[in-house]
Image: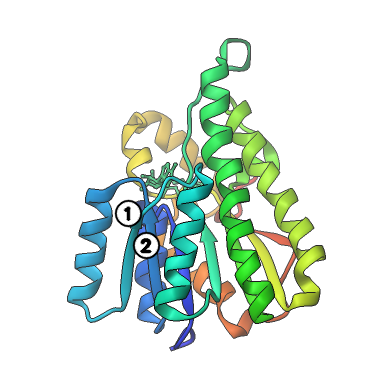
Amino acid sequence: MRLKEKVCVVTGAAAGIGKAIAIKMTSEGAKVALCDVDETGLRETAAELRELGREVEFFKVDVRRRAEVESMIAAVVAAWGRVDCLVANAGIIQDCQFPSMTDEQWDRVIGVNLTGVFLCGQAAAKVMIAQKSGCILVTSSVVGLYGNFGQTNYAATKAGVIGMVKTWSKELGRHGIRAVAVCPGLIETAILSTIPEKVLEAMKEKVPLRRAGTVEEVANVFAFLASDEASYVSGVAIEVAGGLLI
Ligand SMILES: NC(=O)c1ccc[n+]([C@@H]2O[C@H](COP(=O)([O-])OP(=O)(O)OC[C@H]3O[C@@H](n4cnc5c(N)ncnc54)[C@H](O)[C@@H]3O)[C@@H](O)[C@H]2O)c1
């Protein structure tokens, strides 16, 4: 039980990687605040976890809205007294080749993936500074390191959060706070089911391990990073991509 007594906030927790992180962290003893815009998904995830005897609360939060983020963090502190780990994981894609990308596609992705991480990180950091400990983990992507066809907006945000994490590591380290970016590669989530089988096979061929990763394999890394076992890991971007360099 590496996360016993730890209080974790996970955004984008209603589905995919965020849900897997919540499942893993609670299995390690953490209390987890599940945050998402998808209220139905949140209720289902919370019910699933409570059925297993795990301690969770859920909050319908749009990470783009400062007031909603701040009141969620305040409610977590009121309920559990602290925030040991923020997982800023909520993210979206709006792919389009660069010459045709619209302002709306740009703004939407920047809003969730970059502004959302800024707002959640700032609200959590204030609590962590006061308690003199904590860690901020952000879901970036290998796309933030290497770029990707049709993902100008997404790549900008995923590279941007790596810059934020490196800056927070420098600014907040003296308060006992760590910051780390996790860069998943090709991971089996709902998004992959929309990709034609032939294209998917070609993508898997590029992965040295010749397969997509699972959400559990990503969640395992987050659980380690949130634990005291990672007490000297900060200011880095960790790839969970089976060796893939796009
Ligand atoms: N799936 C992959 O292969 C992959 C690879 C690299 C990085 N990532 C990143 O992992 C993270 C999770 O992605 P996923 O694949 O699990 O996607 P997903 O779509 O399954 O989950 C994302 C969750 O974020 C929520 N969300 C969207 N906008 C929000 C907002 N404004 N406020 C709060 N919640 C919001 C969604 O409702 C959803 O539940 C994202 O940041 C994504 O960019 C995914």
* Residue 150 visible (yes or no): no
Q: Is mark 1 within 8 Å of ligand 1?
A: yes
Q: What x and y, as percent, mark residue 144?
A: 65, 42
Q: Label 1 belongs to which residue?
A: 14
- To which quarter of the image does residue 44 belong? bottom left
Are the residues at dot 1 and dot 2 in contact (C-beta closer than 8 Å)? yes
Q: Is mark 2 within 8 Å of ligand 1?
A: no
Q: Nearer the viewer, mark 1 or mark 2?
A: 2
Residue depicted at x 60% and y 29%: 153
Comes first in the chain, label 1 or label 2: 1
Where residue 183 appears, as percent x and y from the top left, is 60, 53
> Mark 2 = which residue?
34
The residue positioned 82% from the left and 64% from the top of the image is 170
Mark 2 residue element:
strand
User: What x and y, as percent, mark residue 208?
Assistant: 57, 51
- Neighbourhood count class around disc 2 (C-alpha, 10 Å): few under 14, some 14–19, many 20 upward: many
Identify the element where label 1 is drawn.
loop
As measured in the structure, the alpha-carbon distance from the residue carrying label 1 to the one carrying label 2 is: 7 Å
The disc label shown at residue 172, or none = none
